[in-house]
Each structure stands twice: as structure tokens, then as C-alpha cells.
Image (cartoon, rainbow, N blue to C red):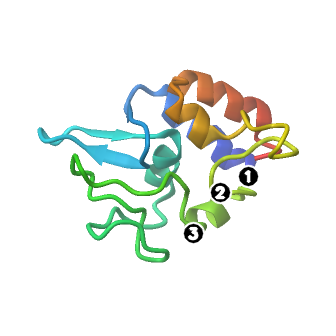
Amino acid sequence: MKKAIATRWVKALRSGKYSQCTGSLSKESPDDEVSYCCLGVLCEISEQGKWVPEGYREGKGYGATRKEAAHCEGQLPSTVVKWAGLKTDDGFFGTNRKTDANKELATLNDEGRSFKQLANLIEKHWKTL
């Protein structure tokens, strides 16, 4: 991925500005509190689209209305992938999907890795993302 974007993403994840969620790029609670997975934070800083009410649609936006029940797949839209210079839409940073199953940012986020832990991985593996 592009180093400058990796640096911005790491800074955003470490900023404390974003609450973390799992299973979706972004969610909104009934009391309008917004949370993001690590890939959703990348969407936020990219400004390559917008959150759309009808769910994920390529070219239309990022995916979620951010309401409690609304969520989308945990993969990035191609516009964000291209902008960031990522190789995959799920943040895979290994060399072989069979042997490196634990090297996917979307999965690690959903398994409970903190934003700080994920930021450390992005910082370390930005060249292979």
C-alpha cells in the first residue's frame, strides 16, 4: 500500500477518535454513537465515497447506514482499495492465504485485536498490504 496513506491510517487508528466495532465497516447504535472496524476507519479518512442507506453497493458508497441492524460485508469498496494502493479488499498482508490465514486485518479486527495492535501491524506490513 502507499506509505503516506498507511501513515495516515495508523495515525487515525491510534488517535482515540474512533470507537471499534466488529462484523461491519461501520455501525451506529440506537443512541447515534458511531463505531468502525479498522477498514471502516480507512474509508473515513479516504473520502472516496459516503455511507449509504441501502447497504453496500460498489460505486455508491461504503455500505452501512450505521443504524444498529444495518451492516455490510467487511470488505473495502474498490475505490478505497485503489486509492490506498492495497492489494486486497480485506487487508491481507501474508503471502499465502492457506498458510497465513491469521494475516487479514478484517478477521483480526473481528477477533478482538485493538486498533493499536492493528496499527502496529499496518505499520510493520504496509509494503505487503
Spot occupied by residue 69 in the image (x, y as percentages of width and height): 24, 50
Q: Pointer 2 and pointer 1: residues touching (CB < 8 Å)?
A: yes
In whole angstroms, how far apart are the C-alphas of marks 1 and 3? 14 Å
Give the residue at x 26% y 67%. 53
Helix, strand or loop at disc 1?
loop
For the residues bearing labels 2 and 3, Cβ distance under 8 angstroms = no
Please name the residue that numbered disc 2 is placed on: 84
Residue 83: mark in rendering: none
Depth check, front residue: 77 or 46 = 77
Q: How many residues crowd mark 3 within 10 Å: few (<14), some (14–19), many (20+)?
A: many
Q: Is residue 10 above or below residue 83?
A: above
- Residue appearing at x 54%, y 65% in the figure: 77
Query: First in sequence: mark 2 or mark 1?
Result: 1
Question: Can you tell which mark lies on residue 2?
Answer: 1
Name the residue: 12% across, 38% down.
31
Left/right placement of residue 108 relative to residue 48 reads right
The vertical placement of 15 against 107, above or below, is above
Q: Quadrant of residue 82?
A: bottom right
As drawn, which residue projects farthest toward the left? 31
- The amino acid type found where label 1 is placed reads Lys
Q: What residue is disc 3 on? A: 79
Q: Amino acid at mark 2?
A: Ala
Who is closer to the viewer here, 43 or 88?
Answer: 88
Q: Residue at x 49, y 74 (%)?
A: 58
- How many marks overall? 3
